[in-house]
Amino acid sequence: MKDDATGWDVPREGLWGFSHCAFFDTWYPWTGGSFESRLERLVGDLVESGANSWRPQIHWHQVERTPYAGPLTPDDVTAGDVEEYSDSADWSKYDRMVDALVEAGIVPHLVVGAAYDFQLPAAVAGGQLVRATPDAVGRDRYLARLYLHSRAVARRYRGKVRIWQLENELNAAGETMLLVRWRSGRAWLDFGFLTAVIEVISRAVAEEDPGALRSHNFQAQWRLIPGIYHWHIDVEKWLGLLDVVGVDAYPNYVIGWPSMGSRVGRKVKEAVELSGGRPVMVLESGYPVKPRHRGMSEGRQAEFVRDAIASTVEAGGVGYYYYMICSPEGYPVEGPWSNRYFQSIEPWWGLVRTDDTKRPAFFAFQEAVAPAKVAAASSGAD
């Protein structure tokens, strides 16, 4: 929440839309269409759904195309380094994506600094080409590289992106590393290092885009490894770095029956109590339609969407992003969307079928968002 007169704030009607972690190849992969045609379709579906925001991730390695040595610590980064980095980066597809969203009246809510392994750039360490994880390149060098990248991204889209997300479910990074292997290295188990990560991204955005909002999506659903994190404590520790508090809630991740969308509001209510008056949003939440043997179905997906949005509004949330409007649906794409074991739900979040028809949840979202905007505006007026 911005206190200065020049800052941007969450619109009175709130921010309602969709989250997206994957790269461009997961947009309607069954069509085989060009980037431009799939982007046009994506924006059209966002508008049709009633969404007024979209939260995609800037994939680090798609911008930083060649190994880059760079400064050794964040304090070594200069304005010239940021300019040099920006000039060498490949912004082409992200430029078109951001411009298309803005032209359609969709607020881009970009994720910067996310570090799942498949998103990271390459680095030279010990004379070898490696993935630039904190353990591979060294923590200080990683933080310097992250700070440089984040400054360049924020500078590039300043004025077009009014709200940023810093990293992705960083409080649960250690559990993500241990259980699903989307991250690598022991650094993700060190909460001091995690704090340093979110601090340098927050600092980068504040320096390059001081009028924008900074948010983070705290993993708030479950903790499979006792003591590895506690999202209430994590919010309190990082609150000073944020303008918007986000929660990620997936009550139906493991089993699809019964649909538990109303439980999303419980997390929002808890976050509101912790937020110190900052706006609270659901930055990720969803219900997959497969596998069937875990109780997932299209009907329950629609029920989940209706209940999750209604409960978010009732709990005082100012926005909700469903994860995802379009998902891989079993097609091979970049990223960790395995169709095996515990993660077998990952390719099946979307609201669009491979025959290009919309699932009932698409229309449930459409119907739920209109009154949610009115309720948020009325609450703000009070």
Image (cartoon, grey):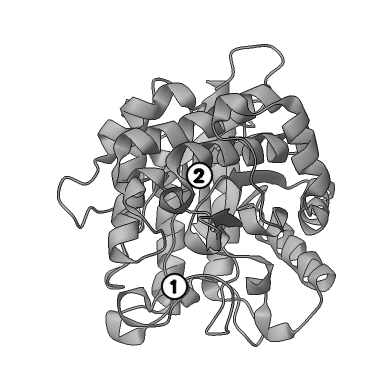
> Quick check: can you spot residue 129?
yes
- Residue at (79, 35) in percent of width and height: 83
Reading the image, the residue beneath label 1 is: 346
Left or right, 36 with respect to 330, comes to right
Q: Give residue 105's position: percent from left, percent from top.
A: 78, 46
Q: Amino acid at mark 1?
A: Glu
Secondary structure beneath label 2? loop
Q: Give residue 71's position: percent from left, percent from top.
A: 62, 35
- Residue at (83, 56) in percent of width and height: 92
- Residue at (41, 48) in percent of width and height: 169
Left or right, 279 with respect to 27, comes to left
Secondary structure beneath label 1? helix
- Residue at (85, 48) in percent of width and height: 103
Q: Name the residue at the left extreme.
A: 226
Please rate how many residues cluster around mark 1, counting C-alpha atoms within 10 Å: few if below 14, some from 14 to 19, many from 20: many
Q: Distance of mark 1 from mark 2, alpha carbons? A: 20 Å
Report the front residue among 74 and 253. Answer: 74
Reading the image, the residue beneath label 2 is: 167
Report the front residue among 135 and 342. Answer: 135
Q: Name the residue at the front extreme.
A: 127
Quadrant location of the N terminus in the rendered image: top right
Tell me: residue 56, above or below residue 4: below
> Quick check: can you spot residue 157?
no
Number of numbered discs on residues: 2
Q: Give residue 228's position: percent from left, percent from top.
A: 21, 46
Q: Amino acid at mark 2?
A: Glu
